[in-house]
Amino acid sequence: MAAQRAPLGLKISGKRLWNRVAGPFELEQHEMSVLLQACRTADLLDRLQTVIDEGEVIVSSSQGPRANPAAVEFRQQALTFAKLMASLRIPVEDDGDVRIPQQRSSVRRASLSATK
């Protein structure tokens, strides 16, 4: 299966991620949607990092010194990115070993006795 071209609007990190995942892996349509969101998030992280690099980590506000809002948003987007990538379960090469990221089960499970 030929790799799909990176969607329009993606920047450097988003395109790089798209090509590294969509090229070698066959993804279902819903996985392609997750990948697109991960690529957009990667690009957003780059933009936020630029804002952080050009500013201060601690900024003044009417309530006193605060963390730069871009740094706070960066943390949230980094968590989102990690969750999106984990949901794709792309094999990771680690010193020549290929492993699948750990699958986490949900806290809530359907009870077998509830269906009886």
Image (cartoon, rainbow, N blue to C red):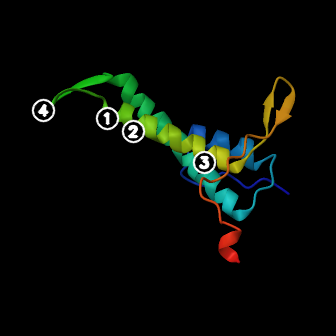
Q: Residue furthest bottom?
A: 116
Q: Residues within 10 Å of mark 2 (few under 14, many from 20)?
A: some
Q: Residue furthest left?
A: 62
Q: Is residue 36 above or below residue 69?
A: below
Instruction: Give the spatial CA distance, label 1 vs label 2.
Output: 6 Å
Residue wearing tag 4: 62
Q: Amino acid at mark 1?
A: Pro
Instruction: Give the spatial CA distance, label 4 vs label 1.
Output: 14 Å
- Mark closest to the chain's N terminus, 4 or 1: 4
Q: Which mark is residue 69?
A: 1
In the image, residue 82 lies at what x, y percent? Answer: 59, 40
Residue wearing tag 3: 84
Q: Residues within 10 Å of mark 3 (few under 14, many from 20)?
A: some
* Mark 4: secondary structure: loop
Residue wearing tag 2: 73
Q: Nearer the viewer, residue 89 or 5?
A: 89
Is there CB contact under 8 Å for labels 4 and 1?
no
- Mark closest to the chain's N terminus, 3 or 1: 1
Q: Amino acid at mark 2?
A: Glu
For residue 3, side relative to residue 66 (left or right):
right
In the image, residue 40 lies at what x, y percent? Answer: 54, 48
For residue 87, side relative to residue 91 (left or right):
left
Is there CB contact under 8 Å for labels 4 and 2?
no
Q: Amino acid at mark 3?
A: Leu
Is there CB contact under 8 Å for labels 1 and 2?
yes
